Image: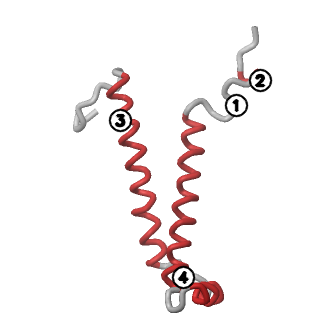
Amino acid sequence: GAKIINLDLTDDEDKGMYQGTQKILVLVMIMVESIPQVFGYLFPATTFVSALNTFSPGNGTLLADTIIIAQVAFGSYLVFLMDEVVSNGGSAAGSPSSSPPG
C-alpha cells in the first residue's frame, strides 16, 4: 500500500487497532450521510408533523427530522452489522452443508 498509516496488519494488536478505527469511522460516516439527507431532501409528512406537534407544540418538524435521522442511521447500522457477518465467513459458516465432505 501507500504506507500512509504505519500498521503491520499481520500483528494482532495493529490489526485490532485498524479494525476498531475502521468501525468508528463507519459510525461517523453513517451520521455524516444521514443528517444532510434529512435536512436536504427528506421531508416528513404534514400529518406526522401535526401529530408530533401535539406532544411538543411548535417542535413537530424538528422531532420528525430527528426521528428520520435515527431511522436512517439505524438502518445503515444494520447494514453495517450484516456486512460484518458476511465478511466473517458468511451466514452459512460452520453449518454441515458448507463443510467439505469427508
Name the element at disc 4: loop
In the image, what residue type sits under mark 2? Ser
Say whether disc 2 or disc 3 marks the residue closer to the N-terminus: 3
Q: Which residue is mark 3?
A: 18
Q: Quadrant of the N terminus?
A: top left
Residue situated in front as seen by the camera: 101 or 69: 69
Report crowding for label 1: few under 14, some 14 to 19, many 20 or more residues within 10 A (C-alpha). few
Quarter where residue 18 is shown: top left
- Residue mark closest to the camera, 2 vs 3: 3
Q: Which residue is mark 4?
A: 43
Q: Which residue is mark 1?
A: 92
Q: CA distance from mark 4 to mark 2?
A: 47 Å
Say whether disc 4 or disc 1 marks the residue closer to the N-terminus: 4
Residue situated in front as seen by the camera: 65 or 32: 65
Q: Which residue is mark 2?
A: 97
Percent position of residue 32, x then y = 39, 63
In the image, what residue type sits under mark 1? Ala
In the image, what residue type sits under mark 4? Phe
Percent position of residue 87, x then y = 55, 35
Against 95, residue 50 (above or below) is below
